[in-house]
Image (cartoon, coloured by chain):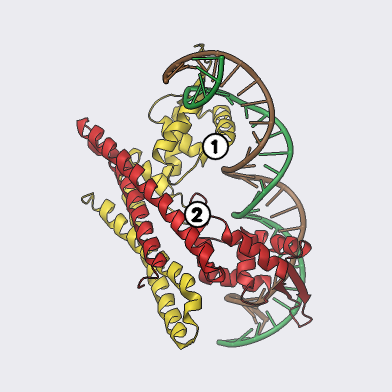
Chain colours: A yellow, B red, C brown, D green
Amino acid sequence: MVEYVSLGILMQGKMSGYDIKKISEQSVSLFFKMSYGSLYPALKRLVEAGHLIEEETNDSKNKKLYAITDQGRNSFLGWLREPLQSNRREHLLKIFFYDYLEEETRMRNLKAFQLQLQSGIAQMEAVQAMVSKELEQLPNKEEFYYRVSVMHYGLQFFKMEHEFFSKIIEKGDL
Amino acid sequence: MVEYVSLGILMQGKMSGYDIKKISEQSVSLFFKMSYGSLYPALKRLVEAGHLIEEETNDSKNKKLYAITDQGRNSFLGWLREPLQSNRREHLLKIFFYDYLEEETRMRNLKAFQLQLQSGIAQMEAVQAMVSKELEQLPNKEEFYYRVSVMHYGLQFFKMEHEFFSKIIEKGDL
DNA sequence: TCGAGCATGTAACAAGTTACATGATTTC
DNA sequence: GAAATCATGTAACTTGTTACATGCTCGA
């Protein structure tokens, strides 16, 4: 993931590793934390793979500037085009970069994900209904307060996400 | 984490590795996915560390039952008592098991986390205000539609989480 | 009898964290 | 002149995934 996030940030223009990290903190830090220990080796690999070009500046700080190549751009777009998956939580990361993606793929993926969410919600609602029935039979309900709350939270969360997707699919008011 | 989730599930009573996975899917799968490749080695380590006792059943399927020891219970509770941190997303996992924790620590941790959320929200709102001002100056606003949407989503999400915490702290209606 | 589910495990690999290590520059 | 920040990197470690490997049992 560091690699794709780095490529995504470098779509803006060339910059140093240090800058990439700073920008990631100001933008995608909600969904993704980057450490130098993963970033610098990743940049090295990307250069070796021809996805980036390294440029040594001989200014005082001897920092290096990284620029994305066509190959890198293609690789990044390939990643963006993949179906959205919520299991790895990378879906929001991808959507953050969706302005770079062509409308068609964008809509296809957003709608597919929307459907997944819908069936997930239906499933969870079924489970919840069952659980709360079972729970009512028990004398010691309060012992499951946090369990139940967290399940409830999960459901709420998915419903919120579903609503969010509806809005961005319709390019609704934000 | 597999280790703590396994211990948490075994607080209910002894069962096989296979069962642990099944139960994890029915309960915490929203926040945590378990694979056998991590589960079985984890169980082995927990036995070696004295946190679990392994019991061979000689029934046809030759499955093994795992039971939590006092040491394991203490280790699990130690983990539960740690402050909640949202960076690793393990906070909901912990809260799921919070019925096992004493009220005092529970409230202390929930309230501390609530405060963190609050300052996070304030910070994000400030950033958002700045960004949307800057954005209005630009002629090509639409090129940042997804970026802006995702940021908006993040803020919404944290607000929702904040509300959730308010409710469970007050033992409010769910 | 055949496939789904029960049941356990290993090995290679992937990805990232943490701590360490270093040094220049800017700002107060 | 001290502290913060810019700037890059490595090595050991942690954690988990994926694919492979095996074999039993129960119901249709």
Task: Read off the residue under disc 2.
Answer: B89
Q: Is residue B57 left or right of residue A79?
A: right
Q: How many labels were placed on the picture?
A: 2
Residue displayed at 58% across by 61% down: B80
Q: Position of residue A28 (x, y in %)?
A: 41, 41
> What chain letter is assigned to the residue under label 2?
B
Residue in front for this viewpoint, A118 or A63: A63
Residue displayed at 32% across by 53% down: B156
The local secondary structure at tag 1 comes to: loop
Respond whether the residues carrying marks 2 and 1 are from the same subunit: no
Residue in front for this viewpoint, B15 or B51: B51
Q: Position of residue D13 (x, y in %)?
A: 71, 44
Residue in front for this viewpoint, C28 or A1: C28
> What chain letter is assigned to the residue under label 1?
A
Residue displayed at 59% across by 32% down: A41
Give the amino acid at mark 1. Ser
Residue displayed at 44% across by 76% down: A127
Give the amino acid at mark 2. Arg
Residue in front for this viewpoint, A144 or A164: A144
Q: Position of residue A91 (x, y in %)?
A: 42, 50
Task: Read off the residue under disc 1.
Answer: A35
Q: Is residue A69 visible?
A: yes
In the rendered image, the vertical position of residue A8 relative to residue A68, given as above or below: below
Q: Quadrant of residue B55?
A: bottom right
The local secondary structure at tag 2 comes to: loop
Q: Quadrant of residue B159?
A: bottom left
* Structural crowding at the residue carrying mark 1, measured as other residues with C-alpha within 10 Å and reported as few (<14), some (14–19) or many (≥20): few
Q: Is residue A59 left or right of residue B120?
A: right
How far apart, in angstroms, are the residues tagged by discs 2 and 1? 17 Å
In the rendered image, the vertical position of residue A63 relative to residue B117, given as above or below: above
